[in-house]
Amino acid sequence: MPPLHCEAAGGSATAPPGADEVSNPDRGRRLSGWLCAPAAVWMLVCCALPLAGLLATSVLTRGPDGEITLPITLENYRRLLGFGVFGFDPVYPWVLVRSLFLGLWTTGLCLLIALPLTLWLVRLPERLRTVALTLVVIPFWTNLLVRSYAWQMLLAPESLPCRLLRAAGLLGPDQGLYPGWGAVLIGMVCDFLPFMVLPLYACAERLDWRLVEAALDLGAGRWQTFRHALWPQLLPGITAGSVLVFLPATGQFVVPDLLGGARLMFLGNLLQQQFGVSRDWPFGAAVATAALALVCVGLWLLQRRQTRSPIARP
């Protein structure tokens, strides 16, 4: 047994680690502030200042040669709402609505596929589960453009899947899924499905299956068991996955541009057009600001829904 070292009366005792922070809370607060400073600077430089510049640009005017000039005006927002020089034109409001529907459809379809897939994954043996998760993540190993061009070939009128659909009477003569809404949805779901599966899988690994067994023992049906025993436990993963899918899907422009053709205009395509070919940065900034506001409202509604859920209550 090692000898005990005792200080004499009136001597100085060695303070245990962390005692300075406990006895001096101001020093701990200053240290926390310095540790948070890099993150605060990053948020200011990379988030707050660009957003402020975007908002300021949206109320300025496009000059004759595409330059940004005064005066300050709300004409860009009026134009976005459809009130232009020649009266009401719903082209731009429909672009916003179409983009929101694309995000909602993509999120809903990803959720419908990911829920049963995730519940199946967590019941697999450990080795098979690793292989299955690898297969889910494999699409990330290829470029988005390559995947989109591959879908163009798979969904073209002369492709084998479209021939089978025509033989089943689901498509008209010489009709294919590309270009059109069907091709866009298929491409979007396949691209964003891992963003829904992985948060759901992380949540499903911690499921309390005793609640499911208790519900079944008490005579609950499969739907009641899923609704009252599984859904509240999966809701945090559903919320996280929905955010990860809805946000990029609403502003996506590569997949709609390549698989939708020139017929469909979405938010990402409109932004690309205004900041690129048209060189109308003030109107593009107004479109981006309105889209950001709509996304923030959607996030607020999702957060409010999760806060009210039984699983989020203490």
Image: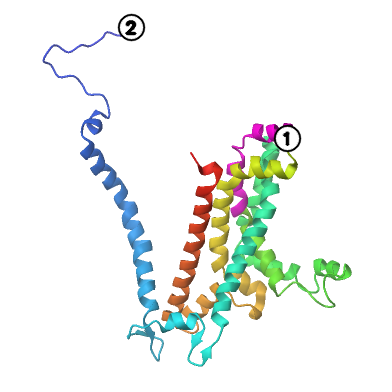
Q: Is residue 199 visible?
A: no
Residue 313 rendering spot, x and y as whole percentages: 50, 41
- Tally of numbered discs: 2
Q: Is residue 194 left or right of residue 18?
A: right
| Residue 166 visible in the picture | yes
Q: Residue furthest front?
A: 219
Q: Residue tagged by mark 2?
A: 1
Q: Amino acid at mark 2?
A: Met
Query: Mark 2, residues whose alpha carbon is within 10 Å: few (<14), some, or many (≥20)?
Result: few
Q: Looking at the rendered structure, which numbered label has been put on residue 216?
A: 1
Which region is colored magenta? 195-219
**Quadrant assignment, res 5:** top left
Q: Residues within 10 Å of mark 1 (few under 14, many from 20)?
A: some
Q: Which residue sits furthest left?
A: 10
Residue 283 lies, in percent from the top left, at 45, 80
| Dominant SS in magenta | helix
Amino acid type of the residue tagged 1 in the rendering: Leu
- Which is nearer the eye, 224 or 83? 224
Quick one: SS at disc 2?
loop
Picture layout, residue 132 above or below residue 178 = above
* Residue depicted at 22% across the width and 24% down the height: 15
Percent of width and height locating residue 131 = 68, 43
The residues bearing labels 2 and 1 have C-alpha atoms spaced at a distance of 58 Å
Vertical position of residue 251 compared to residue 213: above or below: below
